[in-house]
Amino acid sequence: MTAPRTQRSGPGWRVRLRRDRSLLLMTLPAVLLLVVFNYVPLFGLVTAFQEYDPLIGVWDSQWAGLYQFERLFGDPLFWGALTNTLYLSLVQLVLFFPIPIALALLLNSVLNQRFKNFVQSVVYLPHFFSWVLAITIFQQMLGGAGALNQFLRSHDLATWDVMTDPDTFALLVTSQVIWKEAGWGIIVFLAALAAINTDLYEAAAADGAGRWRRLWHITLPGLRGVIVLMLVLRLGNALTVGFEQLLIQRDAVGHDTADVLDTFSFYYGIATGDYSYGAAAGLFKSVISLLMIWGANKLAHAFGEDGLYRK
Amino acid sequence: MTQTLTPSTTVDTEPDAVRTPPRRPGRGGRAPWEEPPTVAGQAGKGLTLGGVLAVMLVPLWIIVVTSLSTQGAVNRAGGLVIWPDGLTFEAYRVMLEDATVRSALLVSLGITAVGTLLSMVVSVLCAYGLSRARSLGHRFLLALLVITMFVNGGLIPTFLVVTGLGGYGEWWALILPGAVSVFNILILRSFYSSTSLDLIEAARIDGAGDWRILWSVVLPTSRAVTAVMALFYGVGYWNNFFSVMLYMPTDSEKWPLQYVLYTYVNRGNGLPGSVNSGFGTQFAQTAPLSLQMAVVVLTLIPLLIVYPFVQKHFRTGVLTGAIKG
């Protein structure tokens, strides 16, 4: 964006510095925290190209070139984690993504304001639970000693410990995400629905369009922008699937099933002290993620939508 | 002087796009042109939303009831109690007598209070500092902030920086690294930018500086969004689990409640006072079930106290961020 000419002829920077000094002072604490905990770690990424030894530090550690990446690409555990990440992402995209949209449409059609508000405050709630709490609740309901098996046992049926079954783990993880986040996800769609001009509905009704035709020709096109934006965000974050969620459940189902790129980086980086290896895995993930955000945005532009930023 | 500046609390901070358009008068809030509801449609909606509510509420109900049940009732039910059958606060008494749980409760409350206060002060100041158009360097500073949303060092470099600064086993390691949420700052900033310029100009003419304007004009007009941001930060600190795992995994005196919940309920390690089954026994039930459920409820209580007061402002807080970007 180019500044308009009139702004150029404004006061010089010394004058502006004096004028804005308290504003600048106000931003200082936040900027300092971000520099220390976000920008300095960016330089810490050089450890991915080293044989980092915490005892001698970043400055003196041996340079290793691309050795860590060669190790990474020859490591079946890494490919397993990458496959798990993409698989879980795909399952969540297919099973989770449409649910908040459907729920928002449903809730929007409820006319009783008090009931609507009640449902909203209940479905928002789990978003504020920690993953430890959410998984504890799932464990108590579906686990080996949980409510489901208690019921099955009392009816002499075969029991099923959902929490430790690797075969259905992807579905379990997705249902946890749905339980915890689907309600929160409706907020942005409800806002988009509220912004649709009601005159359109009236005009369509006058032209003889029934409720389903109005849904198809007015409501859904009205949601299109938000849906594309959410899809871009989701695709851009395809390599990030529930870090804490999987970390907590990893031991119960085994790392073959539950390791994703983030937990891989944690376990083979920090827990074993092989920092450079973990940093290399983290860097790989960051670079691919950035490319995916960029690509997904291109795709959004191709559909004529704004995406994350305008062209 | 400032008396005249302080705006009334009825100032509408809700952005126009968010406001629900007024329904036209008609029967049952229905617009005149809308079709009357079909029985099948009503039943379908009712069943679906009822199901959604049940999935959310029934587990919470079972957990609360079990935590309030006697050992006898738990035994009769063969585990979780679905319908109350004798009421006792025994589990809560035993739990609060446990040193680990008590210190964890204090740790959690302390970290949440200190962290939220710090985050709010830093974020509000930064958001206001960036909200005045044409101030020196605000484009550069804004870019500096936004870049961190897309690019970061990742887990290990951050861990190395925090431990390098001596953060291992220290309280500040649980607070400072995540104290600033750029997303929250951007939401606050978009609110402050839209605070009526007339009010601010009036204050300026009365001789108020930026600090005064922030405190007496901008903050009082944006109470709703301040409350929502404080809740977001507070919940973040209260739910903090992973930093504990990173920076103080063995120091049980410094554990917050979430970590106790993880260790004693999820991993079944047993409360220190009870028979300890040791590590590795996956999901074994050592501590009595009612006691475990009491720990669960304890992690929920503060949230349930604050939530009703802030919940009605969610739309305001979240949507400005989502819509204005």
Image (cartoon, grey):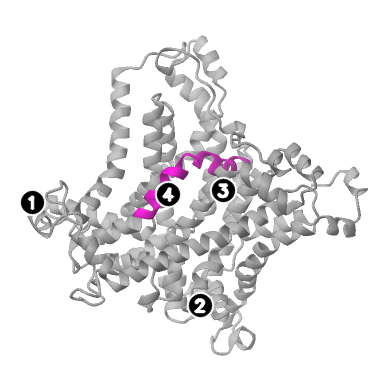
Looking at the rendered image, the quarter that the C terminus of chain A falls into is: top right
Q: Establish whether labels 1 and 2 are both on one chain.
A: yes
Write down the residue under mark 2: A277
Residue at disc 3, secondary structure = helix
Q: Establish whether labels 3 and 2 are both on one chain.
A: no
Q: Earlier in the sequence, mark 4 or mark 3?
A: 3
Where A199 falls versus B183 (above or below)?
A: above
Near mark 2 (Cα within 10 A), the count class, few <14, some 14-19 or many ≥20, is many
Mark toward the viewer: 3 or 2: 3
Q: CA distance from mark 4 to mark 2?
A: 43 Å
Q: CA distance from mark 1 to mark 2?
A: 50 Å
Write down the residue under mark 1: A154
Rendered location of residue B183, percent (x, y): 59, 53
Q: Establish whether labels 4 and 2 are both on one chain.
A: no
Quick check: can you spot residue B325? no
Q: CA distance from mark 1 to mark 3?
A: 50 Å
Q: CA distance from mark 1 to mark 4?
A: 39 Å
Question: Looking at the picture, which amino acid does disc 4 mark?
Answer: Val
Near mark 3 (Cα within 10 A), the count class, few <14, some 14-19 or many ≥20, is many
Q: Residue at position x 18%, y 75% from top?
A: B275
Provide the residue span drawn in magenta: B301-325
Q: Which chain is mark 4 on?
A: B
Question: Looking at the picture, which amino acid does disc 2 mark?
Answer: Tyr
Q: Residue at position x 67%, y 45% from top?
A: B218
Rendered location of residue B255, percent (x, y): 38, 72
Residue at disc 4, secondary structure = helix
Q: Which chain is mark 2 on?
A: A
Rendered location of residue A249, percent (x, y): 33, 64
Where B100 falls versus B30 (above or below)?
A: below
Q: Establish whether labels 4 and 3 are both on one chain.
A: yes
